[in-house]
């Protein structure tokens, strides 16, 4: 245990002193601060208030009997002007930038025709929905008032509808999917890039001959575990700093209503936090040990990328399997992703937040992941022990298998 702590301390000091680690962390923190200040920056550049588009509504036939003036009082996102004009006059006003667009209301048989006039149109252009709804409602109210209906009769034909989306009790899912997708992305970044550092560190030390000194003073098993835990602690601390900075910036710089609408933090409970940290640790250990294995099979830093490609592909598959099944969290594929050790670190915290995973489900998932880690650790330490002093060319898969079989 003492030797593992010694290797851990050496690894942690080496990691935090690296310029690449310091600079990358600072850049990420700066980008987070700038990113959360983008709305304030845009607001300062454009000004606090932006002028609404000028919209001319023309009712030459007085179909609305002067009622269109009521639209000026509604907050429709336009500076509305009511008047009379021909199409040519409207065209001239748009060309002279007196107005942005216009609406002409005409009677056609028993229908009311709405002509939306703009300078240039595209395939995506359409009459603004807010204006359409306001005009429809106004015309309906005018016609109803002509009938002389009582308030009770009006209420019976124009009820207030309240819509809500609900699921059955068995499939009930609470929480904000966007919040958990963001958390899953952060977990993937933390696990993938921190684990990658294990491979890079091992190969770099082999190049600098430091490994020979380590091997003579301690066992390969101690080196693997010490370096894996040390880099993991640094990565966990880095993630805490990054996430903490993001939360502080979100609370400080974003409008509270916008923050609550985009990122619902109501279901971020202490239990979810503990589960997320547990899966970060276990997911990191699984991938870090795989990277330790690949790092020990090469002796030159330029070979690290190609050696790590299979593990990188495996990590991406696990992440996307989890990410895309979030669209249908009650599906069997999402349940499989939460148990499959390659994707469970990214998926199970999501199911916990959505209230879809029981304590038994979490225990089974963790048990599968722990068994997987033990198997990977056994294989990785065995191959690492035999390949640690290999300074030749990159080993093939056949060489790795033969090395594992050797005593």
Image (cartoon, grey):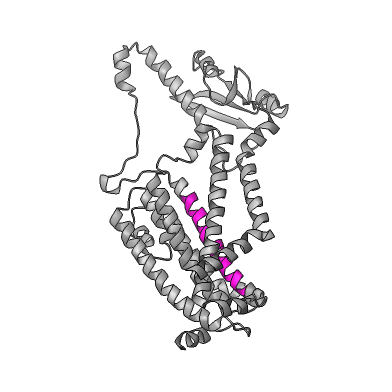
Residues rendered magenta in the picture: 181-203
**Residue 367 image-quadrant placement:** bottom left
* Count of marks, rendered view: 0
Q: Residue at x 53, y 25 (%)?
A: 76
Whole-percent x and y of residue 94?
68, 28
* Left or right of 130, for residue 150: left
Residue 147, relative to residue 331: is it above or below?
A: above
Whole-percent x and y of residue 214?
59, 76
Viewer can see residue 100: yes
In the displayed image of the protein, which residue is found farthest to the left?
169
Q: Is residue 187 magenta?
A: yes
Quick one: 223 or 321, which is closer to the camera? 223
Whole-percent x and y of residue 337?
38, 61
Quick one: 397 or 287, which is closer to the camera? 287
In the displayed image of the protein, which residue is found farthest to the right?
96
Q: Residue at x 30, y 48 (%)?
A: 171
Q: Residue at x 53, y 73 (%)?
A: 223
Q: Is residue 331 magenta?
A: no
Viewer can see residue 192: no
Whole-percent x and y of residue 179?
46, 46
- What's the magenta bit mostly, secondary-structure-wise? helix
Quick one: 57 or 5, which is closer to the camera? 5
Quick one: 26 or 178, which is closer to the camera? 26
């Amino acid at each position: 245990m003492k030797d593992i702590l010694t290797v851990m301390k050496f690894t942690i000091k080496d990691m935090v002193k690296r310029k690449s680690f310091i600079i990358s962390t600072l850049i990420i923190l700066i980008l987070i601060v700038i990113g959360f200040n983008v709305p304030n920056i845009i607001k300062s550049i454009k000004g606090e208030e932006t002028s609404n588009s000028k919209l001319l509504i023309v009712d030459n036939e007085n179909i609305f009997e002067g009622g269109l003036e009521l639209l000026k009082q509604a907050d429709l996102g336009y500076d509305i002007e009511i008047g009379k004009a021909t199409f040519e006059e409207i065209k001239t006003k748009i060309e002279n930038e007196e107005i942005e667009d216009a609406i002409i209301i005409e009677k056609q048989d028993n229908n009311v025709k709405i002509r939306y006039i703009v300078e240039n149109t595209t395939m995506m252009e359409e009459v603004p929905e807010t204006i359409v709804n306001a005009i429809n409602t106004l015309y309906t109210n005018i016609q109803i008032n002509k009938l002389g209906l009582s308030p009770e009769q009006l209420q019976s034909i124009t009820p207030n509808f309240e819509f809500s989306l609900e699921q059955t009790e068995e499939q009930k899912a609470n929480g904000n999917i966007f919040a958990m997708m963001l958390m899953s992305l952060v977990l993937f970044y933390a696990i993938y890039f921190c684990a990658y550092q294990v491979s890079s560190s091992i190969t770099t030390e082999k190049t600098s001959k430091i490994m020979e000194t380590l091997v003579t003073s301690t066992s390969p098993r101690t080196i693997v575990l010490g370096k894996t835990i040390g880099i993991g602690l640094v990565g966990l601390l880095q993630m805490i700093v990054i996430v903490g900075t993001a939360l502080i910036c979100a609370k400080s710089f974003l409008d509270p209503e916008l923050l609550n609408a985009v990122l619902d933090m109501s279901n971020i409970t202490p239990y979810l936090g503990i589960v997320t940290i547990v899966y970060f640790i276990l997911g990191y250990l699984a991938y870090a040990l795989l990277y330790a294995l690949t790092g020990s099979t090469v002796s030159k830093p330029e070979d690290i990328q190609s050696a790590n490609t299979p593990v990188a592909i495996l990590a991406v598959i696990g992440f996307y399997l989890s990410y895309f099944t979030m669209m249908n969290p009650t599906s069997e594929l999402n349940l499989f992703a939460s148990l499959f050790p390659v994707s469970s670190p990214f998926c199970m915290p999501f199911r916990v937040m959505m209230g879809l995973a029981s304590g038994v489900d979490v225990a089974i998932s963790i048990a599968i992941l722990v068994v997987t880690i033990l198997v990977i650790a056994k294989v990785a330490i065995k191959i690492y022990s035999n390949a640690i002093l290999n300074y030749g060319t990159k080993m093939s898969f056949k060489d790795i298998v033969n090395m594992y079989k050797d005593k």
